[in-house]
Every structure is written in C-alpha cells, then in structure tokens.
Amino acid sequence: ALEGRDYENVCNYILYFFNVNAQVFLYCNTAENITQS
C-alpha cells in the first residue's frame, strides 16, 4: 500500500515528467517554426 509520503513522491514524479515533456514539446514546436519560416 502507498503511504501518504510515497503518494506525494509519485505525484511529484508525474508532475516533473509531464513538465519535462511539455518543455520538450514546446522546444520541438519552436524549432519547427524557425525552420519553416
């Protein structure tokens, strides 16, 4: 079973993972826009 603290760590990890993914996605979009123009 997950304890409160473990659950917090899992949430933080998921948030971090999505945050990194969002940044990579933004970076790729920006790079695409620059190469197109």
Image (cartoon, rainbow, N blue to C red):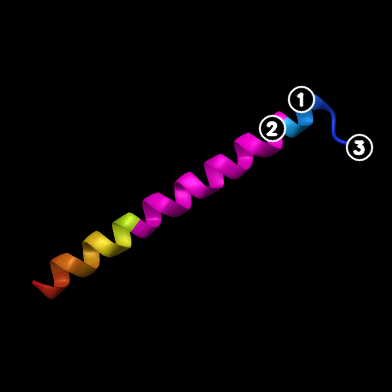
Q: Which residues are magenta?
A: 8-25
Residue 21 covered by magenta stretch: yes
**Could you tell me the amino acid type at mark 1?**
Arg
Mark 3 is on which residue type? Ala
Amino acid type, label 2: Asn
**From the image, which quarter does the N terminus lie in?**
top right
Q: Nearer the viewer, mark 2 or mark 3?
A: 3
Q: Kindly indicate whether the residue at mark 2 contacts the one at mark 1 (C-beta within 8 angstroms).
A: yes
Q: Which residue is mark 3?
A: 1
Q: Secondary structure at mark 2?
A: helix
Tell which of 3 and 32 is nearer to you: 3
Q: Position of residue 14 (x, y in %)?
A: 61, 44
Residue beneath disc 2: 9
Check the image and name the residue furthest to the left: 37
Q: CA distance from mark 1 to mark 3?
A: 11 Å
Q: Residue at x 51, y 49 (%)?
A: 18
Tell me what residue is drawn at x 75 percent, y 33 percent: 7
Question: Which quadrant of the structure image shows residue 24?
Answer: bottom left
Task: Reply yes or no: does residue 19 show up in magenta.
Answer: yes
Task: Please state if 1 lies on the left or on the right of 24 as rendered.
Answer: right
Which label belongs to residue 5? Answer: 1
Give the quadrant of the C terminus: bottom left
Residue 22 image point, x, y percent = 41, 52
Element at badge 3? loop
